[in-house]
Amino acid sequence: MLHVTKSFLPDLKEYVGYLERIWENNHLTNDGPLLKELENKLKEYLQVEHLVFVTNGTIALQLSLKALQIKGDVITTPFSYCATSNSILWEGSNPIFADINPRSLTVESSEIKSKITPDTKAILTTHVYGNAGDLEAQEALAAEHHIPLIYDGAHAFGVQYKGQSIFNYGTLSTCSFHATKIFHTVEGGAVITKDAQLAAKIIELRSFGHKNDDYFSAGINGKNSEFHAAMGLVNLSHFEEIKQYRKWACELYDSLLQVPGETIRFNDQIRRNYSYYPVLFPHESYLLNAVEKLQAVQINPRRYFYPSLNTLRFVGPQTCPVSEDIAKRVLCLPLSASIKEEEIRLIAELVNQSFK
Ligand SMILES: *Cc1c(COP(=O)(O)O)cnc(C)c1O
């Protein structure tokens, strides 16, 4: 069985080396030395100012909304994983969906603009597949309306936009380090910001709202453990080779696939991370054909992201025609740091056959 993603696992010996340190320290969680080392190495690697390691990418979004005291309407993207809009709902706010651009699949800045009202408290959009929309226009909109701009960067680890980390854009960014993501700590995530005060607030909230023995706010448990930090430290040391391998795999797919019609376009100002290989089909029926052919030989692609989030029954009816159309036609093909050339060739051949 070949799935859409396969988690990277380093040589066990490398991980055991870190386990020995955990046994020596007898410090398992709560701001341990490996967590601090991971936070520092990630800040250095990504070239960002503040990075707070948390339990997962969803709590990273929730802590962000909580720290910014957002309550009300939040303009967001309908084309993302459900964690993006669920975190808004979970924090007692209302997701207001702004439609996406049909080529970049990121939210359209003019759509955000048209949805802003006096009740808008924040903008929260996704760098979907590690792609970037018009970040400057979005920053300008947020500044003009004095509202925070949050980026769900779950897919964007290591992506650069105009020569710097994409996480440096917006009021803050979040990332997911889940086992299926390009860089992982098994479970994990982070909040990244240039704002020292905001970072301090997130650190307080991730640990029940206390500093030492004093309680300052109604925090939550968003901490992560030394075991997770250890996996991150090992995987970070392999990240460049993982990215290079995935680049090779994506380029092989590019050279083999013959998909009619418009393709997804990556922003030419970014340095990509090759986190996903999405294919846009000219019609849903071809996509279903391809899924059937692939599943017949035990290959599992995923309909990331289907359905369009604005159509979920618990968010109430809102319309986003572009996202609804795209969500029906996009399929992510298997991509990992261990996918083999013959697997890619077989997948491409079956996808090409689905148009006949
Ligand atoms: C994976 C993902 C999340 C959630 O991250 P977890 O670490 O699994 O909680 C949030 N947003 C997007 C876009 C994702 O793909």
Image (spheres, rainbow, N blue to C red):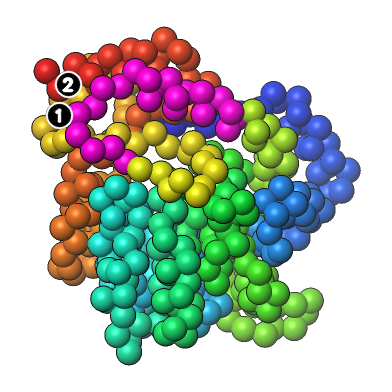
Q: Residue at x 39, y 33 (%)?
A: 277
Residue wearing tag 2? 354
Q: In the figure, is residue 8 to the left or right of 18?
A: left
Label 2: few (<14), some or many (≥20) within 10 Å? Answer: many
- The quarter of the rendered structure image containing the C terminus is top left
Q: Residue at x 47, y 66 (%)?
A: 136
Q: At label 2, which amino acid type do we have?
A: Ser
Magenta span: chief secondary structure = helix
Q: Residue at x 63, y 72 (%)?
A: 202
Residue in the foreground of this view, choosing between 261 and 320: 261
Q: Give the residues in magenta.
A: 242-264
Q: Quadrant of residue 258?
A: top left
- The quarter of the rendered structure image containing the N terminus is top left
* Disc 1 from disc 2: Cα separation: 6 Å
Residue in the foreground of this view, choosing between 276 and 106: 106
Q: In x, y percent, where is residue 348?
A: 31, 18
Direction top: furthest residue: 342
Res 120 seen here: yes
Q: In the figure, is residue 112 to the left or right of 354?
A: right
Q: In x, y percent, where is residue 316?
A: 18, 69
Say which mark, if any, is on residue 286: 1
Q: Which residue is drawn at 32% across and 51% down?
A: 105
Residue in the foreground of this view, choosing between 305 and 216: 305
**Does 286 appear above or below 93?**
above
Say which mark, if any, is on residue 318: none
Q: In x, y percent, where is residue 324?
A: 18, 53
Label 2: which secondary element: loop
Q: Earlier in the sequence, mark 1 or mark 2?
A: 1
